Image (cartoon, coloured by chain):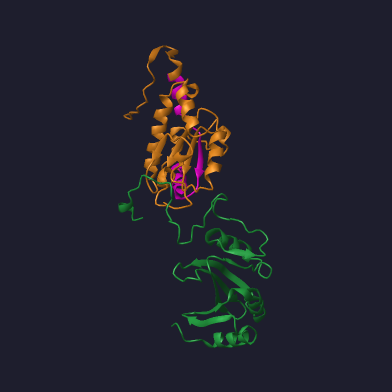
Amino acid sequence: MGVTTTVENSPAGYGGPGFFATSLDKAVGMARKNSIWPLPFATSCCGIEFMATMASHYDLGRFGSERLSFSPRQADLLMVMGTISKKMGPILRQVYEQMAEPKWVLSMGACASSGGIFDTYSVLQGIDRIMPVDVYIPGCPPRPEQVIDGLLQIQKLVENESLRRRNSQEYKALQAKYGLE
Amino acid sequence: MTGTVSDILNGLVEKLKVKFAADILNAEQMFDFPVITIKKEKVLEIVKDLQKEGYNFLTDLTGTHYPGNSGNELGIIYHFHDMPNNRRLRLKAFTSINDPAIDSLTSIYPGANWMERETYDFYGIIFKGHPNLKRILNMDEMNYFPMRKEYPMEDAKRDDKDNAMFGR
């Protein structure tokens, strides 16, 4: 019919009619990356921009993040979007601690990444003061295209993560650095 | 136009001076607002009289800090509104920073409750008789009063910003 579609490359493996053999890492990575359920922790303007990204025009659901979860127990990705005040910090930490492994954190916008323009007594100067962050999206607010780019970066991290990473010494040290666990 | 005293203000100040002659420090018309500056000791009685006068709505209660006015650094500013007659009034009471206490208005205006908590949170002004005087917007563990001009506005723990470039 003249329409060409490109399909994403499948992971390296050996396939034949009716079967495909690959390593578990790669299969799990592919499954995880295409079904990230985000927890939108939206506080300010970035939250509105995220709403636009989830809407039909930019549609984050195309990338598997169709089902948002406001319960941390059921979410994979914590998206912190907006200014976090120092009073909100412990609450955000509690939400992060309640998430089950594997979990990723995306900091959207200038305020969540570094306090933004609010260098003041009440604003937490970046959520990486209280929790480990995987991807930062700069912008005030970032355009939906940038948010999608950030999610694709998370997807790259998810795809290539080793299955044993969450039990490794380095990860435990990282958590200990923030006083978690 | 500042300085000229309007009729509303004239009548009101005369009525108040009958009882509180020594406590009215200043009365002037600042643009569209009559402003009366009083001594803080009699604030509760003066406000009770104002309420009887018809000023039934406490629009705002806030604080100021002018470090230059020694002896009168902290100010407590009240805004009243007489809704049936559409008259507004600003009341100012100043106090020294070493004795930042004033009577609370919560007994006559319940709406003053949270406004006084906010003023305490940011300026450290103690409202005597307030049922629950504790911080409302800042973290409970904060040990200073951020809106006082003695403290920098910026976050104290930032060490990666160059002061010259960021104008601190």
The C terminus of chain B: image quadrant: bottom left
Q: Quadrant of residue B118?
A: bottom right
Residue drawn at (61%, 56%), measured in percent from left and top?
A: B134
Q: Is residue A152 above or below residue B57?
A: above
In-front residue for pair A148/B62? B62
The N terminus of chain B: image quadrant: bottom left
In-front residue for pair A77/B64? B64
Residue B10 belongs to magenta span: no
Q: Is residue A116 left or right of residue B97?
A: left
Residue drawn at (37%, 25%), measured in percent from left and top?
A: A8
Residue A96 appears in the figure: yes
Region of the chain picked out in magenta, as a range: A26-55
Q: Is residue A152 left or right of residue A181?
A: left
Q: Is residue A143 left or right of residue B16?
A: left
Residue drawn at (46%, 84%), measured in percent from left and top?
A: B3
Q: Is residue B161 left or right of residue B76?
A: left
The chain drawn in green is B
Q: Is residue B120 above or below residue A22?
A: below
Q: Quadrant of residue B2?
A: bottom left
In-front residue for pair A78/A122? A122
Q: Is residue A11 above or below residue B40?
A: above
Q: Quadrant of residue B53?
A: bottom right
Residue B62 point in image, percent of width and height: 54, 66
Q: Taken as a whole, is the magenta stretch helix, strand or loop?
A: helix
Residue drawn at (50%, 22%), measured in percent from left and top?
A: A167
Q: Tell me, what hue is chain A?
A: orange
Residue A69 appears in the figure: no
Residue B39 point in image, percent of width and height: 58, 76
Residue B142 point in image, percent of width and height: 54, 51
